[in-house]
Image: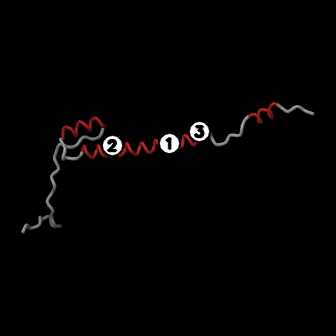
Amino acid sequence: MTAPSAAATNAEAVPHPGPRPDALRLAVDLSRAETELGKLRGQLREAVDFVHDPAYDIESRRALARRLGVPEPSHTPTIPTAATDAAGIPPRRS
């Protein structure tokens, strides 16, 4: 009988690379991280909506914008425009 070669012995000792046992755990962690990121984006969107809402104090909104690193609100208050027709003439009041 012949002795097995060293290469054959090493090949048998190395397990076949299959799916990693921690792949499921990593997939779950990734899913949780994506969910948390979605929540944080929603919270940031709400904060930015607050920053640009003229119903609140301008200085508070500016301070929050600076803190969050988002564009500051303009200091010019938004004035709603009157409804006009296609020619730009406001409707008659009765």
Query: From mark 1 to mark 3, how far is it between C-alphas?
Result: 12 Å
- Residue 32 to residue 93: above or below: above
Q: Which of marks 3 and 2 is in front?
A: 3
Name the quadrant of the N terminus.
top right
**Percent position of residue 77, x then y:** 16, 47
| Front in this rendered view, residue 2 or 72 | 2
The residue where tag 2 is placed is: 44
- According to the picture, the residue beneath numbered tag 3 turns out to be 22
Q: How crowded is mark 2: few (under 14 residues within 10 Å), some or many (20 or more)?
A: some
Q: Which amino acid does label 2 sit on?
A: Leu
- Residue 37 percent coordinates (x, y): 41, 43
State left or right for residue 18 relative to residue 46. right
Crowd around label 1: few <14 · some 14–19 · many ≥20 (10 Å): few
Q: Residue 80 carries which label?
A: none
| Quadrant of the rendered image containing residue 69 | top left
Which quarter of the rendering shows the C terminus?
A: bottom left
Image point (22%, 40%), residue name? 61
Q: What residue type is labelled 1?
A: Leu
Circle 1 is placed at which residue position? 30
The kind of residue on which mark 3 rests is: Asp
In x, y percent, where is residue 19? Answer: 64, 42
* Callout 1: SS: helix
Q: Which residue is drawn at 71% across and 40% down?
A: 16
- Tell me if 22 is positioned left or right of 69 in this view: right
Name the residue rendered at 8%, 67% in the picture: 92
As measured in the structure, the alpha-carbon distance from the residue carrying label 1 to the one carrying label 2 is 21 Å
Q: Is 90 located above or below residue 21 in the figure? A: below
Q: Which residue is drawn at 75% across and 34% down?
A: 13
